[in-house]
Image (cartoon, helix red, strand yellow):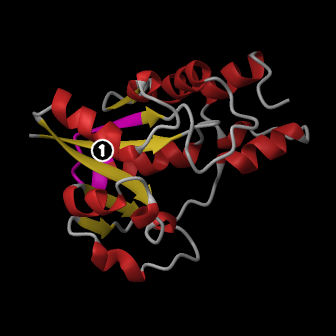
Amino acid sequence: MIKTGLLFGSFNPVHIGHVAIAGYMKEFESIDEIWFIISPQNPFKSPEHLVSPVARLEMTRLAIEQYAAFSTSDIEFDMPRPSYTLNTLEILEERFPERDFYVIIGTDNINSIGQWKGGKTLLEKHKFLFYPRLDTDNSKLHHFRNARIVNAPVIEISSSFIRESLLRGKDMRPFVPNAAYDYLEKNRFYE
């Protein structure tokens, strides 16, 4: 089986934290490949300041193109919106039975996953690799049958911080991979 890590997100914009976490999972958690699943609309986030899904897919593709084990996925583009992790996992497992999927997610989600659509099924059926986030309560981790917290570095960079800073005219190039930054600057996203 091919061990495939799934990093779900809006990637609005993609940043060096996303790439670093993917790199950690590949190198230190024996994950063969990482798929960046671009979500057209997260059910828990406002669509305000959301760049088009196609633009976010391209931005992410540019950010990771130098890494052979990383790829982007637009699987949620044809699904009803908002998209739900459980539905996406069901489709992926049906289409790719030769892969063993691992959801890569921050510890800040541990206490809320039970409230997601199909949260109980997610907790029972799917594998999770949690990367650490500051100030999170990990007490409910025992609800997950196939989950663990990895010893990855804590990276506290957020897409919202980058967007807000860009709107204030700040140069955020150190926070976004070069090719992705060139693309967002050329298209005047977040201005």
Q: Is residue 50 left or right of residue 118?
A: right
Bounds of the magenta segment: 26-36
The answer to whether residue 126 is seen in the rendering is yes
Is 13 rendered above or below residue 116? above
Q: What amino acid type should be assigned to the residue bearing mark 1?
A: Gly
Is 47 rendered above or below residue 145? above
* Residue topped by disc 1: 5
Is 177 rendered above or below residue 21? above
Residue at the image point whose x is 43% and y is 78% from the top: 138
Query: Residue lying furthest bottom in this view?
Result: 139
Which quarter shows the N terminus?
Answer: top left
Residue at the image point whose x is 34% and y is 37% from the top: 88
Is residue 24 or residue 12 the one in the foreground? 12
Residue at the image point whose x is 57% and y is 24% from the top: 53
Q: Is residue 175 left or right of residue 97?
A: right
Q: Quadrant of residue 29?
A: bottom left
Q: Is residue 43 left or right of residue 34?
A: right
* Residue 94 on the magenta span: no
* Residue 29 on the magenta span: yes
Residue at the image point whose x is 33% and y is 51% from the top: 103
